[in-house]
Image (spheres, rainbow, N blue to C red):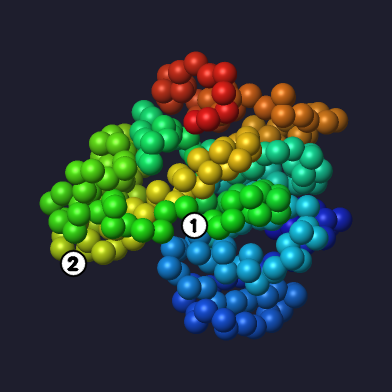
């Protein structure tokens, strides 16, 4: 993608494969590096493996592109939106770019109200953001969250709101989140599948918490569709030019979901 659309932008590709032993390394064609990942926390621990592999070299780059195997699963043409205009504007902003998604209603986790987030499958951010986060894994321990009972998988005192628990169960095992599409790999919540449910639910919590943690260090989240249009038309972009996430999404989601977005708030928090 980068080579074809941005021939003047230097880049390096590192693939972290969670199916390979941690510590395994190989050099592939085209200068691509391959390393193994721990898979202790899905893509989030893999990114930690990659960041550790780069070490201080990561600071030599203007942007870091985090992606998963699902990086292409957005709207059909979203990858074409990443061009030299985007790369030119983003490093000067305290902002993180990706596909912003949202629930119909806000929920809460660990005392933080949340409704919108950046999908972990495709994120562009700066090396200083990685340093500020410390680790890409925000939720490591499931003991305070899960009950061990497939009939009631969450502890009564779990730090997750009831509405968010329903969203997790609905997405992984039911008809989705009320926005139409259902997850392609949904399953019945049985004792046999409970470990997978807990692992996948923790990954979803890590995805949401990544956005929450980025907001906590002062970052603004920006939707790629909105930003690409803005970058193409503007000579410069400042943080003051970036509206609330609801305003960013209205042209993209259309009338069907626009009513769910309500009025934009004054702050940046979803």
- List the residue tagged with mark 1: 137
* Residue in front for this viewpoint, 161 or 124: 161
Asked whether, in this view, residue 269 is left or right of residue 95, the answer is left
How many marks overall?
2
Q: Give coordinates of residue 7: x percent, y percent.
A: 83, 57
The residues bearing labels 2 and 1 have C-alpha atoms spaced at a distance of 26 Å
Q: Which residue sits at x=53%, y=44%?
A: 213
Outermost residue to the top = 263
Q: Which residue sits at x=52%, y=51%?
A: 120
Outermost residue to the left = 151
Q: Which numbered mark, 2 or 1, is in the foreground of this view?
A: 1
Q: Is residue 212 above or below residue 61?
A: above
Q: Give coordinates of residue 174: x percent, y percent.
A: 24, 46
Q: How many residues crowd mark 1 within 10 Å: few (<14), some (14–19), many (20+)? A: many
- Does any portion of residue 200 appear in the rendered image? no
Q: Is residue 237 above or below residue 183?
A: above
- Does any portion of residue 98 appear in the rendered image? yes
Q: Which residue sits at x=66%, y=54%?
A: 131
Where disc 1 sits, the SS reads loop
- List the residue tagged with mark 2: 192
Q: Give coordinates of residue 92: x percent, y percent.
A: 79, 40
Q: Which residue sits at x=27%, y=45%?
A: 158
Quarter of the image holding residue 26?
bottom right
Q: Give coordinates of residue 186: x percent, y percent.
A: 28, 54
Quadrant including the N terminus: bottom right
Asked whether, in this view, residue 157 is left or right of residue 96, the answer is left
Tag 2 near tag 1, CB within 8 Å: no
Mark identifier at residue 178: none
Q: How many residues crowd mark 2 within 10 Å: few (<14), some (14–19), many (20+)? A: few
Q: Earlier in the sequence, mark 2 or mark 1?
A: 1
Where disc 2 sits, the SS reads loop
């Amino acid at each position: 993608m980068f080579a074809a659309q941005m021939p003047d932008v230097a880049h390096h590709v590192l693939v972290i494969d969670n199916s390979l032993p941690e510590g395994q390394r190989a050099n592939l064609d085209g200068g691509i590096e391959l390393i193994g990942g721990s898979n202790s926390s899905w893509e989030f621990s893999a990114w930690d493996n990659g960041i550790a592999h780069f070490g201080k070299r990561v600071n030599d780059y203007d942007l870091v592109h985090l992606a998963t195997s699902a990086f292409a699963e957005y709207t059909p043409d979203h990858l074409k939106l990443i061009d030299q205009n985007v790369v030119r504007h983003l490093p000067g902003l305290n902002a993180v770019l990706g596909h912003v998604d949202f629930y119909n209603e806000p929920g809460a986790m660990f005392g933080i109200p949340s409704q919108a987030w950046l999908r972990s499958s495709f994120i562009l951010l700066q090396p200083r953001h990685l340093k500020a986060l410390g680790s890409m894994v925000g939720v490591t321990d499931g003991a305070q969250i899960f009950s061990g009972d497939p009939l009631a998988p969450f502890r009564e005192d779990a730090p997750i709101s009831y509405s968010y628990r329903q969203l997790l169960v609905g997405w992984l095992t039911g008809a989705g989140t009320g926005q139409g599409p259902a997850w392609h790999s949904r399953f019945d919540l049985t004792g046999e599948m409970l470990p997978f449910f807990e692992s996948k639910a923790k990954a979803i919590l890590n995805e949401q918490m990544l956005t929450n943690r980025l907001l906590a260090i002062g970052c603004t989240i920006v939707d790629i569709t909105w930003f690409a249009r803005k970058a193409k038309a503007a000579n410069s972009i400042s943080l003051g030019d970036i509206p609330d996430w609801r305003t960013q999404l209205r042209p993209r989601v259309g009338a069907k979901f626009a009513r769910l977005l309500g009025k934009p708030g004054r702050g940046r928090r979803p």
